[in-house]
Amino acid sequence: MSRPLRIEYPSAWYHVMNRGRRGEAAFTTDEDRGIFVDPLKEAVELWNIKVAAYCLLSTHYHLLVQTPDANLSRCMRHINGVYTQRFNREHTSDGQLFRGRYKAIVIDADSYLGEVLRYIHRNPLRAGLVENLDEYPWSSQRGYVSSAKEWDWLYTDMAFSLLTEDRTRRMRVYRRYMSEKDTDEMLDLYESRKWPSIVGSDRFIALMKERFFDIKGHREVPESRVLAPEREMIRDEVCREYQIDEGALLMVRRGVSNEPRDVSLYLIRRLRGDRLEEIAKEFGLHHYSSVSNAIERVNNQLVQDRRLHKMIETIQSRLTSHQSKT
């Protein structure tokens, strides 16, 4: 049986879960849980992943993460692989620890990030392990209600911003939100035997299916990289669609957005899978984060902007036509 295609794109949000093999414990001691958190922190530094939440139970774990560099698979190989090695060394054992590949649900952050965060943090309550969320030491709950520097690695900004724009009230608003029970929709979703691959609004789900469920090529398949359009061709088609010259495309002005440039960066990354550093260098950008930020802007805009969606479709159609003639 072939493995399902992983939906990976810059700045995607995921709820990731994995269980111990054969229903066995993946964490047998508090030391094990600490050993797991270490590679989680390492992934933040090594792979530029943003960890917004985690919860470790005896048989499984939950993560809420964002991947600015579209590298979930690589990050999870590090986290699961390093933890398994350290667990086996600690317990003088060997072999696999988790049950197959992890499960990853793509999350529509604007509509569901808060609910997924609450579901993850309330796991110990639902399991009857604690009566107060703050009592459970092996989740990121404390990172949201503490200003201690030990939690600086945890990415809380997005969740807080969705709950309130008032920074002076965010912990209070967060606590109130966490005190509310999970919605029936969330409970039904996670209690079903088969989890969906996407959780979001109808528009978001339709967009994801259109972009990823009918892909003829994929950057993990060598042939798709060879047949991908040249960067210059992508730039030319973007300039043609926006009726601008290349100078306007490459223009960088502090505090001023450049939609054609953002679309070029988005298409080069999506269609070619080029490294962010390579793309940044070609466009004269000082840091690859400028590329990931531009791609995130396009992704966010595509969810609600039919005009942009149509323009990108037109550009891709012309690029496909060019490729079919070569």
Image: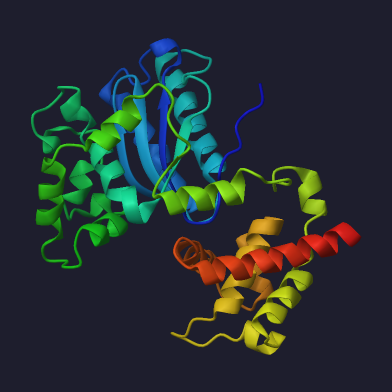
Left/right of residue 228 with respect to residue 136 in the rendered view? right
Query: Looking at the image, which is closer to me, 61 or 188?
Result: 188
Query: Looking at the image, which is closer to me, 216 or 289?
Result: 216
- The coloring applied to the image is rainbow
Q: Residue at x 50, y 61 (%)?
A: 299
Answer yes or no: is residue 6 visible.
Answer: yes
Q: Find residue 266 and report its horizontal and vertical position in percent.
A: 60, 65
Q: Residue at x 48, y 63 (%)?
A: 296
Q: Residue at x 54, y 81 (%)?
A: 258
Query: Looking at the image, which is closer to me, 52 or 281?
Result: 52
Q: Find residue 25 and report its horizontal and vertical position in percent.
A: 35, 15
- 253 w.r.t. 323: above or below: below
Q: Find residue 197 and report its horizontal and vertical position in percent.
A: 48, 37
- 54 w.r.t. 286: above or below: above
Answer yes or no: is residue 274 visible.
Answer: no
> Hey, which quadrant is residue 7 in on the image?
top right
Q: Which corner quadrant holds the C terminus?
A: bottom right
Q: Find residue 218 and report its horizontal and vertical position in percent.
A: 70, 46
